[in-house]
Image: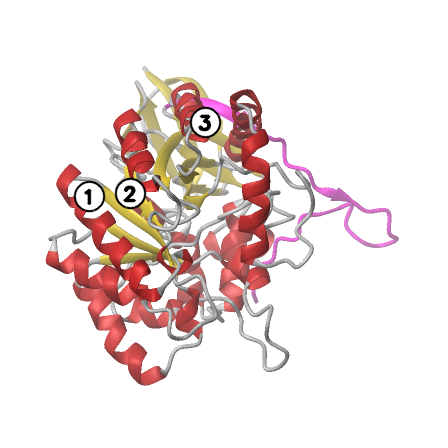
Amino acid sequence: MLDLIVRNANLPDGRVNIDVGITEGRIVAVEPALQAEAAEDFDAAGQLLSPPFVDAHFHMDSTLSYGLPRVNQSGTLLEGIALWGELKPHLTQEAVIERAMAYCDWAVARGLLAIRSHVDVCDPRLLAVEALLEVKRRVAPWLELQLVAFPQDGVLRSPGALDKLKRALDLGVEVVGGIPHFERTMNDGAESVRILCELAAARGLRVDMHCDESDDPLSRHIETLAFHAQRLGLHGRVTGSHLTSMHSMDNYYVSKLLPLIAEAGISAIPNPLINIVLQGRHDTFPKRRGLTRVKEMQAHGITVGWGQDCVLDPWYSLGTADMLDVAFMGLHVAQMTHPDEMRRCFDMVTEENARIMGLQGYGLAPGCTASLVVLDAGNPVEALRLRPDRLAVVAKGKLVAAKARNDSRLSLPGRPASVRRRHRAG
């Protein structure tokens, strides 16, 4: 007797009418017409069954704080950082926890069950660090929350930031962060990369740096990050987030840079919703897109995932905790419209983000953690087009969210009684 069987599902790899058997929080069978009984059966009825969505770049300490203490008037990254600096002294642990827990509820409802969140360590109280460690403890039964020690004001620029970052790691934060392009000089930025990579290597930790989130083609800290990742043997443990300066770089330089990133085993996380609105603010026309060179990196074998980054905070006034919104925007801005590229966009918010985070037991195979989502779509491309309802969300073997299919009703002469926006070519 199994705990749960999801029957008649389509899988992202193209298999159809597949049953998935679950017991004790693990997937034990993935096969057609599974001959077994379960305490609970869920008929997917030909809908898409996916591993859960994964967000490898987010800021949960600031989420849902939009309008506090005021709205970002310029829409720029730097005003957002200044706004966050104004808000920090007024934060309370209770408020940070309450907003973060509310966001995690949104995430679960959308099938987002793993999040890497950067948390600001430049506050001497480490208030947000302690708050998110408490959130991590509370949501652990259903959501994987991985925390990055992020020196928002610069690890060298902000007095005592390095010591506070180390304290955050001592408290249980798992990943070393940085923001070299926000240090006072290019040299300080490069030095911060060295210091932080050596710290991560000494502690056996991963690295995820906000890197070159700028329109400046001479902001080239990703090159320094690749050098130190290679020098310190950090292959597969280092991520460069944003990398927007690459949209302005000379093509010859990029032809040298991409192999260096690939050789160092560095992953990349562009954040299309946020950077499409933050970057290019000083441009008239032609106006830059605010996105790094996604397809070019993928062609060099670099793992690239899509990140949400922000929802309703000083940097971004929208957001829904839906990774399909993120992939949908990324698909458009990166012009990834070939069917294979669209399917890869879906992988970027599932498999590839899971790889970046180093998640264990992720996937739809026997032995994997039984976390999955059923979408009202037939395949990954249709899921991207529709950003559909999540009909069921299972976290570690337990059904944690469900939604009835919500078709639109029509009252038109000679036309169908309802509309689902589904389409079969031919």
Question: Is residue 263 toward the left or the right of residue 45 in the image?
Answer: left
Q: Position of residue 199 (x, y in %)?
A: 19, 43
Residue at image coords 51%, 22% = 93
Specify whether residue 223 is in view.
Answer: yes
Please tell me which residue lies in front, 55 or 74. 74
Question: Is residue 32 toward the left or the right of residue 89 in the image?
Answer: left
Quarter occupied by the N terminus: top left
Tell me which corner region of the image, top left, top right, bottom left or bottom right, holds residue 277: bottom right
Please tell me which residue lies in front, 329 or 21. 329
Q: Is residue 86 above or below residue 217?
A: above
Q: Which mark is residue 176?
A: 2
The answer to if 8 sits in the magenta stretch is no
Q: Nearer the viewer, mark 1 or mark 2?
A: 1
Question: Which residue does the numbered mark 1 point to in the structure image?
Answer: 199
The answer to if 420 sits in the magenta stretch is yes
Q: Give, as a single range, the part of the protein colored magenta.
A: 397-426
Residue at image coords 41%, 24% = 130
